[in-house]
Image: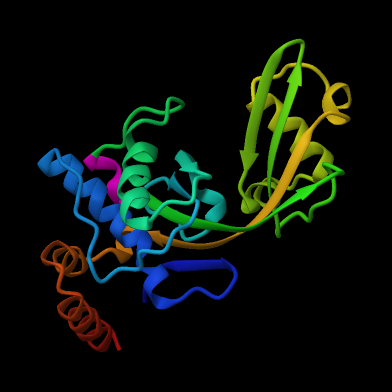
Amino acid sequence: GINAEYMGMEISPAVQNLPYFAFHNVVTCLKEKKMAEYPSNFPDIESPLFVTWKIAPPGKGDDPEDRDLRGCIGTFSKQSLKNNLPLYSYISAFEDSRFSPITLKELPQLYCTVSLLQNFESIKDPLDWEVGTHGIEIHFSHKGMSYSGTFLPEVAQEQGWDQVTTLKYLIRKAGYMGSFDSVKAGMQTERYQSSLHTVGYKAVSYTHLRAHETRHDLVCRLLLEKKKKKKK
C-alpha cells in the first residue's frame, strides 16, 4: 500500500496529494530544469506551509527514526497553494543552506512532508504549549539585534524534548548564543498547529506523476486504483 503518515487534524484526500506534487516538482526541476505546473484540479486554499525532506539509508526508512533531515523551508505568509507549494518544494529541496541540493540519485531514499499551518495563537508564557500538538514561533531582541525562529509541531516530539529544552534549542537555531532565561521575559511567542501528510518516494508511482503532468486527475485515480487491485 501507499507509504503515508498522518498527524493532526482530518486531512481531505485532496490535501493528501500535496507531497506527491512536491516530488513531481523536484523530479521536473532535476530532469527538465523548470518547475512543474500546479494541477488545476488540486486544492488552491490559502495557507502558510512548510515542506520537509528526509532521507533514509538504502533499504531503511519504514521506521521514521531511520530518517534524517535533508531540507525544510516554508513560509508563514498566507498565500495560495498554487503559488507556495511549487516554490517551497523547490526551495526546501535545492536551496536550504544547511544542505547540498537534492540529487536524482537520492530520490528513492527520500520522504516528503507537506505541513499546512493553522490555529495561530499568541501566548504570554513561552511555555504555554503542548509537545506533539503545537509548533512554536519566537521573536525577541537582545542588544539591538532581532532574532526569530520556529519549530514545527512534530519536532519536539521526535527529539524527545520538553518545552524548556525545545526553546533552548530554538534560540540557538535563531542564532542567539545566550541563555533562555536572559531573553524569556521579552520573548513574543506564538503557538500553532498543523495538518500534515508524509509520503515516501516508493509510493510515488510513475503513473501518478504522469497523471499530474497531463493534469488528468481522473486518469491518475484510475491508474492508482488498478495498481492497488493488482496488489490485492
Question: Residue 34: image x %, image y %?
Answer: 15, 41
Considering every residue shown, the one lying at the far top of the view is 143
Question: Residue 208: image x %, image y %?
Answer: 21, 68
Instruction: Please give left or right for residue 43 compared with residue 120 in the image.
Output: left
Instruction: Please give left or right for residue 79 compared with residue 106 in the image.
Output: right
Instruction: Please give left or right for residue 218 compared with residue 53 in the image.
Output: left
Q: Name the residue rendered at 14%, 38% in the picture.
A: 33
Question: Residue 169: image x %, image y %?
Answer: 71, 32
Image quarter for residue 80?
A: bottom left
Q: How is the image coloured?
A: rainbow
Nearer to me, 4 or 72: 72
Question: Residue 21: image x %, image y %?
Answer: 29, 59
Dominant secondary-structure state across the stretch colored magenta: helix
Instruction: Please give left or right for residue 7 compared with residue 3 in the image.
Output: right
Nearer to me, 207 or 143: 143
Nearer to me, 168 or 82: 82
- In this rendering, the answer to whether 115 lies above or below 53 is below
Is 224 part of what is drawn in magenta? no
- In this rendering, the answer to whether 169 lies above or below 28 is above
Q: Name the residue rendered at 35%, 37% in the picture.
A: 91
Image quarter for residue 106?
A: top left
Q: Which residues are magenta?
A: 104-108
Position of the C terminus by quadrant: bottom left
Q: Name the residue rendered at 28%, 63% in the picture.
A: 204
